[in-house]
Image (cartoon, grey):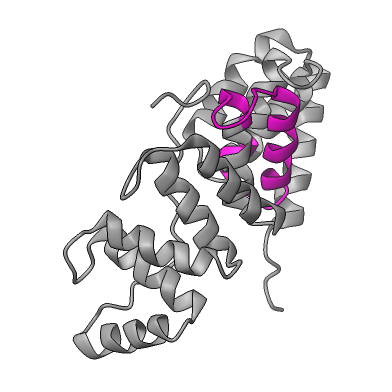
């Protein structure tokens, strides 16, 4: 499946892979059966990955859905991912968008990024670059590197927002600081379209962002 402009998004699973021994797995299963949404989501993750159990997307779907129906954001996102990829269930972009959006409204950064992707590609929803920009920005504000990179792309080409190379460079640099290799490459690529003053301003903005978000060290 194509993703907008660059790389495929990394699969995100909010689950603790507890299956280090049978007793822990049994305890998790009992909690899930009793309706613990976190345990249900974790169990879905174990079946999705195949950790100490045979990989089973159908079982993953079952447990993610149970947790998602309890309004548990990580499970809602994971359920959306299964619908988008057609794993354990028939592929359905409309349902994928629905579940991504539910989690995104609860401020789950990965889901906000996913909603941005769906709007950008027009999957399960009418294509809308303005909405894509909005949701990428929400995720970027929560330190989602891929969303930060997408913002850089949108500013660079003027998609969903007015073209602005200073902001494009800024977001590329922030994404690079978050581990996105192409962020550095793309920022260098647009330098010849910028003045020295603009480059310095972009670097200043990026550094200010990174320092603001960096965890404070105890004295």
Specify the segment rendered in magenta. Answer: 119-148
In the rendered image, the residue lying farthest to the left is: 54
Residue at image x 79%, y 37%?
Answer: 205
Residue at image x 29%, y 63%?
Answer: 59
> Up-down: is 27 above or below 192?
below
Q: Is residue 10 visible?
A: no
> Up-down: is 99 above or below 161?
below
User: Which is the main secondary structure of the residues drawn in magenta?
Assistant: helix
Q: Nearer the viewer, residue 202 or 25?
A: 25
Percent of width and height locating residue 171: 68, 33
Q: The N terminus appears in which quarter of the rendering? A: top left
Residue at image x 62%, y 55%?
Answer: 103
Relative to residue 173, is residue 94 drawn left or right? left
Q: Nearer the viewer, residue 159 or 210?
A: 159
Relative to residue 20, is residue 31 drawn left or right? right
Percent of width and height locating residue 24: 29, 87
Residue 170, by quadrant, is top right
Residue 169, by quadrant, is top right
> Up-down: is 108 above or below 6?
below
Percent of width and height locating residue 182: 50, 29
Check if residue 25 falls in the magenta segment: no
Percent of width and height locating residue 31: 41, 86
Q: Is residue 64 visible?
A: yes
Residue 23, by quadrant, is bottom left
Relative to residue 101, is residue 195 drawn left or right? right
């Amino acid at each position: 499946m194509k993703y907008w402009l660059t790389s495929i998004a990394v699969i995100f699973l909010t689950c603790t892979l507890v299956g280090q021994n049978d007793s822990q797995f049994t305890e998790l299963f009992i909690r899930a059966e009793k309706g613990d949404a976190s345990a249900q989501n974790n169990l879905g993750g174990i079946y999705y990955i195949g950790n100490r159990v045979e990989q089973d997307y159908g079982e993953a779907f079952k447990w993610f859905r149970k947790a998602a129906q309890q309004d548990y954001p990580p499970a809602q996102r994971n359920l959306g991912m299964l619908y988008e990829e057609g794993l354990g269930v028939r592929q359905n972009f409309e349902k994928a968008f629905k579940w991504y959006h539910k989690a995104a409204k609860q401020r789950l950064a990965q889901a906000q990024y996913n909603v941005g992707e769906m709007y950008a590609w027009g999957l399960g929803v009418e294509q809308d670059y303005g909405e894509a920009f909005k949701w990428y920005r929400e995720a970027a504000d929560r330190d989602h590197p891929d969303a930060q990179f997408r913002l850089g792309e949108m500013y660079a080409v003027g998609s969903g927002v007015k073209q602005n190379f200073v902001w494009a460079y800024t977001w590329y640099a922030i994404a690079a600081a978050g581990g996105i290799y192409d962020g550095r490459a793309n920022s260098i690529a647009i330098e010849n379209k910028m003045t020295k003053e603009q480059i310095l301003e972009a670097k200043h903005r990026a550094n200010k962002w990174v320092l603001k978000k960096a965890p404070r060290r105890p004295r």
